[in-house]
Image: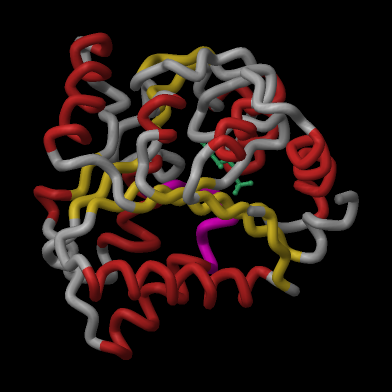
Amino acid sequence: MFFSLPHPQAIADYVTTRLIQLIQKKPNAVLGLATGSTMEPIYEQFCRQVAKQDVNVSELTTFNLDEYIGLGADHPQSYHYYMRQYLFNRLAFAQHRTFLPDGLCGDLQEQCERYSRLILEAGGIDLQLLGIGSNGHIGFNEPGTPFASRTHVVALSEQTRIDNGRFFDSMDEVPTQAITLGLQDIFEAKEIVLVATGTNKAQIMADLYHSPVDEAMPASIVKAHPHAMIIVDEAAAALL
Ligand code: GLP
């Protein structure tokens, strides 16, 4: 389940190959997408290869993991903006089949229920991409989140706000809440690919490697999944 490749580019090549294989087999596949700097080289390589191999992405449905509450789609740090920048503006995705939670939605509870329901109605996620937070969160499921959780509103931990603060001008601007797919939603994906790169992920990957499957370590749910891969580069594997 854990395996290591030399560097982020090798991971981007590997994950892109897997994604394109899936799309060629199932052009209307449902992809679970993640954001964060770990995903950037993956999306870069994916865009390059899709164009080069003329892969049809227009029948895909995508669901993003999460979004900050309080940031609109045009805020440069929103995940809507990120997705347009790295993927949706670059390839011919069908806009009406690319879903992200709405960070400005008035009725959050109703939206959470609808988001999990939409995924089920789409037939479930075929392949879920995941990064990992330095405290073991996936999506924005912070330590202690029930494994049975569905899409929900979370209060971001101080650690997560500090980690993600690097993208904002000041800590005051870092949102305190987010909407995230729940751990149960993630676990129901038919296949999961979790990626971690860089020295700042070395400690959490060692912790995850040794952790039992336990809610104190949200990412450990991936270890219980029958079709999951946890891919690390050499830097993130340094303490394994
Ligand atoms: C955020 C996202 C996660 C992501 C994590 C790691 O908290 N909600 O989905 O995995 O950041 O991001 P990075 O890849 O930038 O380290």
Q: Residue at x 57, y 35 (%)?
A: 224
Residue 11: image quadrant is bottom right
Q: Is residue 212 above or below residue 225?
A: above
In magenta segment, residue 40:
yes
- Please, which colouring scheme is shown? secondary structure
Region in magenta = 33-41
Q: Residue at x 34, y 42 (%)?
A: 64
Q: Residue at x 37, y 22 (%)?
A: 70
Residue 222 seen in render: yes
Residue 207: image quadrant is top right
Q: Is residue 170 left or right of residue 63?
A: right
Residue 161 seen in render: no
Q: Residue at x 50, y 19 (%)?
A: 147
Q: Is residue 182 above or below residue 108?
A: below
Q: Position of residue 43 (x, y in %)?
A: 43, 66
- Closest to the observer, 31 or 95: 31
In magenta segment, residue 82:
no
Q: Position of residue 151 (x, y in %)?
A: 34, 21
Q: Position of residue 102 (x, y in %)?
A: 26, 29
Furthest residue to the front? 226
Q: Is residue 57 left or right of residue 137?
A: left
Q: State which image quarter holds ligand 1.
A: top right
Q: Is residue 172 above or below residue 209?
A: above
